[in-house]
Amino acid sequence: MPQPRPAATIDVRHLAPPDRHAAVFAAFRALALDDTIEVVDAHDPQPLYHRFRVEVPGGFSWVCTHGGPDVWRVNVRKLARAHGAGECCGVCSGSR
């Protein structure tokens, strides 16, 4: 299955380390459902992946398109989450 073309690219290599995750999450929150951002980093972004798993469980897909050694590229796609277990899908504002 072909990967969707990213709506935006976030190159965090030139951001201060404390600002990197915040920049990626801000861009992710601004996405429409099924849109994708490409994250570019100088190291394996596994800590970012684990943070997504905690903060957006079931609400994203993660595809590494280039895995180092000097540059890593990851496509993060925004998915709708199903209602259940007290979570909101992020679309209906809890009106279901």
Image: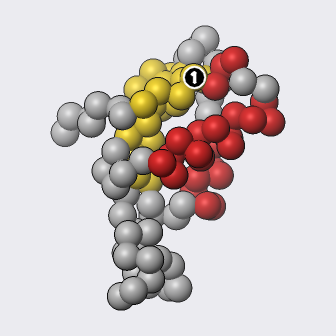
> Closer to the camera, 44 or 16?
16
Residue 62 in sight in this render? no
Q: Position of residue 35 (x, y in %)?
A: 34, 45
> Is 40 displayed left or right of 90 in the figure?
right
Write the residue at 62% across / 34% down: 45
Quarter of the image containing the C terminus? bottom left
Residue 31 in sight in this render? yes
Write the residue at 63% across / 50% down: 50
Q: Which three-letter amino acid code belongs to the residue tagged 1? A: Asp
> Is 41 displayed left or right of 35 in the figure?
right
> Closer to the camera, 5 or 61?
5
Q: Position of residue 28 (x, y in %)?
A: 50, 46
How many numbered circles does the render carry?
1
Task: Look at mark 1 in the image and give the residue it sits on.
Answer: 11
Quarter of the image containing the N terminus? top left
Q: Quadrant of residue 70?
A: top right
Q: Position of residue 34 (x, y in %)?
A: 31, 50
Q: Residue furthest left?
A: 1
> Closer to the camera, 62 or 15?
15
Q: Quadrant of residue 3?
A: top left
